[in-house]
């Protein structure tokens, strides 16, 4: 009866009130324990901490995979990256493929309802010939940002500590300098990273002001470059933390979040805006102290261990979301169907992997999500799932490490497990102690249920054509002066 009453009240509210606005902040390579509100002792994140105090903080929130491009595809489409073809690995400046145009993003879903839509920051879902895969072809009215990761080009122009100390690391020396694009045009190459965050903040502020003046509901997607290596920060944040370049980069992102939240308050739409924050994958442990931390969680980016796929997450909506902490299972996959529910948008007519989580958000209820499956960053039908979480248990069918890091488990080669490694994530979130079926025969039914769910999920998975396997064409690398020579060094314009 209470469920029916809640749904009736929700429907009445949505039919009578102005359509809600939506903002997604998506960090880059940020670990589970990198924020102050998640326990980091030297990170300075006052605005995110404020959102966490006034909103709902998740402890069991997952991305689908430990990599940039596929994780972003899953968030925007509500579908595993295997369906959309954003595998294996990530897209590059000269990649021929990108997020297919027949995939429906959150922005495209909201457009028929009259929403203004904008993306700022790191796209990383393809550029293609003549900007085929840019945000403006995926439902976004506006885009200001870099079409891929900022380390996919020479990083000598990245100033990360005032006034003259440059970022170390070679990045991709053979690629063009990193461009800043507005919609489908290059407006600066190389991008001025010292002023980039201010440009993003100003763009977002103007977008909100314009939308509210028009009384138009809006969706703002801000996938930040922070805190991906090599870190950078403008003069407002550089040198302001005790955590070094990583801490400065995180603080700069936090400042922009504060600017945007202040604009929501100024325009009197704060109470009608759902704000969501998370990160695309765990820390890049190869960079050690410059790569972030997953805290007590195991390993990081590019693995299916908890440190690679379990992320900090905050949902904030004054007057609608009561402050607190939830231990319910949730995922970036669930954002699209949740926004559809709250806005009244029609769900895309495709197989969706996300589930509506309005019960979790609006009344701290139970999650509809019972399981979460994890493919490798290089998935294949041959290997199938690497891991699956069902309730509090996680089973590993394969384990594989990634780069040279201190923990030997995080560099271990591919290994098949039969029977699967079984972990109780409530009692052992660090995944130190696989459970023994010999010692715990009562767990046999748990494993049997996991195998049933695994078989069902794998049977329902249709692998889309790999966009990354289409390869690269150097001529597709963005150049502000396309007829110049020799490339890539001539692609530099003020």
Image (cartoon, rainbow, N blue to C red):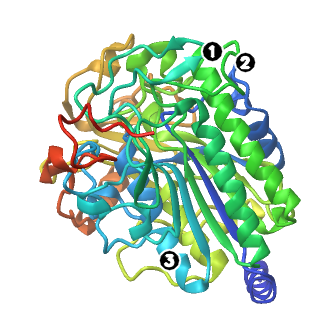
Q: Mark 1, mark 2: which one is toward the viewer?
A: 1
First in sequence: mark 1 or mark 2?
Answer: 1
Is 337 rendered above or below residue 230? below
275 on left or right of 430: right
Q: Mark 2, mark 3: which one is toward the viewer?
A: 2
Task: Locate the C terminus by quadrant.
Answer: top left
**Within-10-Å neighbours for mark 3: few <14, some 14–19, many 20+:** many
**Within-10-Å neighbours for mark 2: few <14, some 14–19, many 20+:** some
Residue 411 percent coordinates (x, y): 28, 19
Per the image, the residue denoted by label 1 is 162
260 on left or right of 262: left
First in sequence: mark 2 or mark 3?
Answer: 3
Rendered image quadrant of residue 338: bottom right
Q: Nearer the viewer, residue 454 or 16?
A: 16
Q: Which of 27 and 309 is in front in this view?
A: 27
Q: Residue at x 57, y 38 (%)?
A: 196
Task: Give the number of callouts.
Answer: 3
293 on left or right of 483: right
Real-space Cα distance between discs 2 and 3? 40 Å
Q: Is mark 1 on a helix, strand or loop?
A: loop
Tell me, yes or no, if residue 472 can be seen here: no
Q: Is mark 2 on a helix, strand or loop?
A: loop
Is 50 rendered above or below residue 250? below
380 on left or right of 177: left
Per the image, the residue denoted by label 2 is 240
Residue 299 percent coordinates (x, y): 42, 25
**Within-10-Å neighbours for mark 1: few <14, some 14–19, many 20+:** some
Tell me, yes or no, if residue 262 can be seen here: yes
Which of the numbered marks, if any, corresponds to residue 472?
none
Q: Which residue is drawn at 44% across and 69% down?
A: 105
């Amino acid at each position: 009866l209470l469920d029916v009453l809640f749904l009736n009240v929700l429907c009445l509210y949505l039919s009578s009130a102005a359509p809600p606005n939506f903002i997604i902040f998506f960090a880059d390579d940020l670990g589970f324990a990198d924020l102050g509100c998640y326990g980091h002792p030297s990170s300075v994140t006052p605005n995110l901490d404020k959102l966490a105090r006034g909103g709902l903080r998740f402890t069991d929130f997952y991305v689908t995979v430990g990599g940039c491009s596929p994780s972003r595809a899953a968030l925007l489409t509500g579908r595993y990256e295997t369906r959309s073809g954003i595998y294996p690995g990530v897209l590059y400046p000269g990649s021929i493929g990108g997020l297919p145009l027949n995939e429906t993003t959150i922005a495209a879903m909201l457009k028929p309802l009259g929403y203004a839509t904008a993306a700022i920051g790191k796209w990383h879902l393809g550029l293609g010939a003549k900007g085929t895969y840019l945000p403006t072809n995926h439902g976004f009215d506006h885009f200001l940002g870099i079409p891929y990761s900022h380390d996919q080009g020479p990083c000598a122009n990245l100033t990360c500590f005032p006034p003259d100390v440059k970022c170390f690391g070679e990045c991709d020396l053979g690629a063009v300098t990193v461009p800043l694009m507005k919609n489908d045009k290059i407006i600066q190459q190389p991008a001025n990273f010292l002023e980039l965050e201010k440009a993003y903040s100003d763009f977002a502020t103007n977008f909100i002001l314009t939308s509210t003046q028009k009384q138009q509901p809006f969706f703002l997607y801000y996938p930040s470059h922070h805190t991906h290596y090599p870190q950078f920060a403008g003069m407002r944040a550089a040198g302001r933390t005790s955590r070094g370049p990583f801490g400065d980069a995180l603080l700069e992102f936090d400042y922009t979040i504060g600017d945007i939240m202040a604009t929501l308050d100024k325009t009197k739409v704060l109470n009608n805006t759902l704000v969501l924050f998370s990160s695309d994958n765990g820390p890049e442990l190869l960079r050690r102290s410059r790569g972030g931390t997953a805290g007590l969680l195991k390993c990081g980016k590019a693995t299916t261990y908890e440190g690679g796929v379990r992320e900090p997450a905050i949902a904030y909506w004054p007057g609608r979301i009561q402050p607190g902490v939830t231990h319910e299972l949730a995922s970036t996959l669930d954002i699209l169907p949740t926004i559809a529910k709250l806005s009244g948008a029609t769900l895309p007519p495709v197989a969706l992997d996300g589930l509506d989580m309005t019960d979790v958000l609006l009344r701290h209820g139970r999650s509809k999500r019972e399981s979460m499956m994890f493919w490798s960053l290089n998935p294949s039908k041959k290997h199938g799932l690497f891991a699956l979480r069902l309730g509090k248990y996680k089973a590993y069918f394969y384990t594989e490490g990634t780069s040279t890091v201190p923990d030997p488990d995080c560099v271990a080669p591919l290994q098949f497990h039969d029977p699967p490694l079984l972990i109780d994530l409530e009692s052992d979130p660090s995944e130190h102690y696989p459970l023994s079926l010999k010692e715990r025969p009562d767990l046999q039914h748990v494993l049997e249920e996991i195998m049933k769910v695994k078989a069902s999920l794998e049977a329902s998975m249709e692998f889309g054509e790999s966009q990354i396997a289409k390869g690269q064409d150097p001529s597709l690398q963005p150049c502000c002066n396309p007829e110049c020579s020799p490339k890539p060094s001539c692609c530099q314009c003020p």
